[in-house]
């Protein structure tokens, strides 16, 4: 009988411990689950942050490439000579001064044909056509409607020396208006492109 009571008491203690052990096991299990979930959450956040960093880096690189490309395009689209000279107004002033210097030049007027043309053709008419020609050749919106260079100069019998005198006067006018070297050279190239149609003789007075 004593043994039975002792066994019963031991069994009763075991039954009381069982719920405690089960509760402890559940606590450990859920604790482990929380840690696992927390670890996964950190891993997801790390991957998400890494992704954003990669995307940001790509955006910066792409933006830099686009900017460089845009700058390249901008540099290719340079201003025309017409724009760099300041437009029609400055061009017309330079042409006006050039014609005013050209008309009374004694060396040029020693050519009877040139002298006769100076008296026959009004200076304003000549300025209008030369301004339109330079404006168009420089990339401006003007349209030259005068005669071709060959047709309008053939009867003047312009010599090489007379041509060089005209170029010298043109350079002096450009210098007077402080036209930059690059633009001066481009204007001289335009003028020289007409030489074959204007100069009739390589000799001269």
Image (cartoon, rainbow, N blue to C red):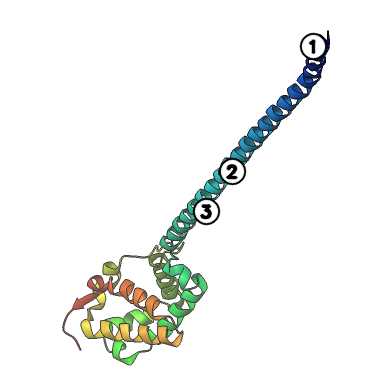
Q: CA distance from mark 2 to mark 3?
A: 21 Å
Q: Nearer the viewer, mark 1 or mark 2?
A: 1
Q: Nearer the viewer, mark 2 or mark 3?
A: 2
The residue pinned by badge 1 equals: 3
Instruction: Looking at the image, tell me whether mark 1 or mark 2 is earlier in sequence order.
Output: 1
SS under mark 3: helix
Which element carries disc 2, helix, strand or loop?
Answer: helix
Query: Which residue is nearer to you in this view: 132 or 46?
Result: 46
Question: Residue 105 falls in which quadrant of the image?
Answer: bottom left
Question: Which is in the foreground here, disc 3 or disc 1?
Answer: 1
> Could you tell me which secondary element the residue under label 1 belongs to?
helix
Q: Earlier in the sequence, mark 2 or mark 3?
A: 2
Residue at horizontal 18%, vertical 86%?
204
Q: CA distance from mark 1 to mark 2?
A: 63 Å
Q: Residue furthest front?
A: 2
**Residue 140 percent location from the top left of the image:** 45, 64
Badge 2: residue crowd in 10 Å (few <14, some 14–19, many ≥20):
few
Q: Position of residue 187 (x, y in %)?
A: 36, 75
Confirm or deny contact between disc 2 and disc 3 (CB under 8 A): no
Sequence-earlier tag: 3 or 1:
1
> In the rendering, which numbered label is found on residue 182?
none
Mark-to-mark CA distance, 3 and 1: 84 Å
For the C terminus, the image quarter is bottom left
Is 51 displayed left or right of 197 in the figure?
right
Q: Which mark is residue 60?
A: 3
Q: Is residue 167 above or below residue 35?
A: below
Q: Which residue is mark 2?
A: 46
Q: Residues within 10 Å of mark 3 (few under 14, many from 20)?
A: few
Q: 146 or 122, which lies in front? A: 146
Instruction: Residue at 60%, 38% (x, y): give it.
Output: 44
Q: Out of 90 and 179, give the one closest to the viewer.
A: 179
């Amino acid at each position: 009988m004593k043994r039975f009571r002792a066994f019963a008491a031991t069994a009763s203690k075991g039954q009381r411990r069982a719920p405690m052990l089960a509760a402890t096991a559940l606590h450990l299990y859920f604790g482990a689950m929380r840690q696992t979930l927390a670890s996964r959450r950190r891993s997801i956040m790390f991957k998400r942050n890494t992704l954003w960093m990669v995307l940001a880096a790509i955006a910066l690189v792409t933006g830099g490439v686009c900017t460089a490309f845009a700058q390249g395009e901008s540099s290719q689209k340079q201003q025309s000579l017409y724009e760099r000279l300041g437009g029609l107004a400055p061009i017309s002033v330079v042409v006006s001064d050039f014609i005013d210097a050209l008309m009374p030049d004694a060396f040029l007027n020693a050519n009877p044909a040139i002298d006769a043309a100076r008296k026959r053709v009004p200076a304003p008419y000549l300025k209008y056509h030369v301004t339109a020609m330079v404006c168009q050749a420089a990339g401006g919106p003007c349209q030259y409607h005068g005669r071709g260079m060959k047709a309008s100069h053939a009867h003047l019998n312009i010599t090489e020396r007379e041509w060089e005198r005209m170029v010298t006067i043109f350079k002096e006018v450009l210098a007077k208006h402080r036209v930059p070297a690059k633009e001066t050279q481009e204007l001289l190239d335009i003028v020289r492109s007409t030489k074959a149609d204007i100069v009739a003789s390589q000799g001269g007075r």
